[in-house]
Image (cartoon, helix red, strand yellow):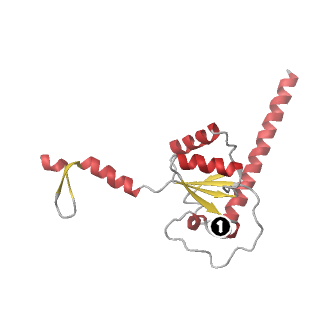
Amino acid sequence: MLSANLCYNKNKQIFPGYHRLKWERIKMKARIQKETVLLYHLSEDTVRGKKIRDGLREMGIGIIDLSEEQLGEKLGYCAGMHGFSPAAEPYTGEVFPEEVMIMKDLSQSRLGRMFQKLQADGVELPGLKAMVTQYNKDWPLYQLFAELSREHAAFVEQEAQRAQAKTSDETEH
C-alpha cells in the first residue's frame, strides 16, 4: 500500500521523497505553455513600449515583436504555435498604423495582474488588445488587427453615446 504513493521512473526505479501527486504536478508544469505577449508597434524605442516591456520582464512574461513584414502571417505562426508554417507569399498590403498587444497562454488571474501592474507603473495600455484563441490563431495578422480596430471603434462610440445619454439625463433632472 505504501508503494502506491511512491513515484517510479520509466525504468521502474523509485524516486525517494517524491510523492506521486507531487510528481504529477511537476509533469503538469512541464506541459504548461510559456506566457507570452506579442507586441506590434510597441518597440523598446518608444516610452510606452519600454514601460510595457519592463513590466512584462519583471513578471517573467515572454515578448515577441511583430513587424510590419509579418502582417500576412497567421497569428499561430507568429505566436510560435506548432503546426504553422510561414506564409507562402510576402505581405504587400497597407501597413497597419496602430499599436497592438496580443496575449498568449495567460490565465485570467495572471492577465488581470499584468494589467494592474502595467497601470500601476503608469502605462497607458493600447486600445487594441486580444488573446490568442482557437478561433483567431488561423487569422492573418492584418485581418485580426482590422477586426480589433473595428471592435475598438464600436466600443469607443458606444461609450461616447452612454456618456452623452448620462449627461442628457443629468441636465434634465
Residue pictured at 63% horizontal, 79% vertical: 88
The quarter holding residue 156 reads top right
Q: Nearer the viewer, residue 52 or 45?
A: 45
Q: Quadrant of the C terminus?
A: top right
Q: Which residue is mark 1?
A: 140
Across and down, in percent, residue 127 comes to 71, 48
Q: Is residue 123 left or right of residue 170?
A: left
Across and down, in percent, residue 152 comes to 73, 50
Q: Is residue 75 left or right of residue 83?
A: right
Q: Is residue 23 left or right of residue 147?
A: left
Across and down, in percent, residue 110 comes to 52, 44
Residue pictured at 86% horizontal, 29% vertical: 168
The quarter holding residue 111 reads top right
Could you tell me which secondary element the residue under label 1 belongs to? loop
Q: Height in image: 135 above or below 3? A: below
Q: Residue furthest front?
A: 45
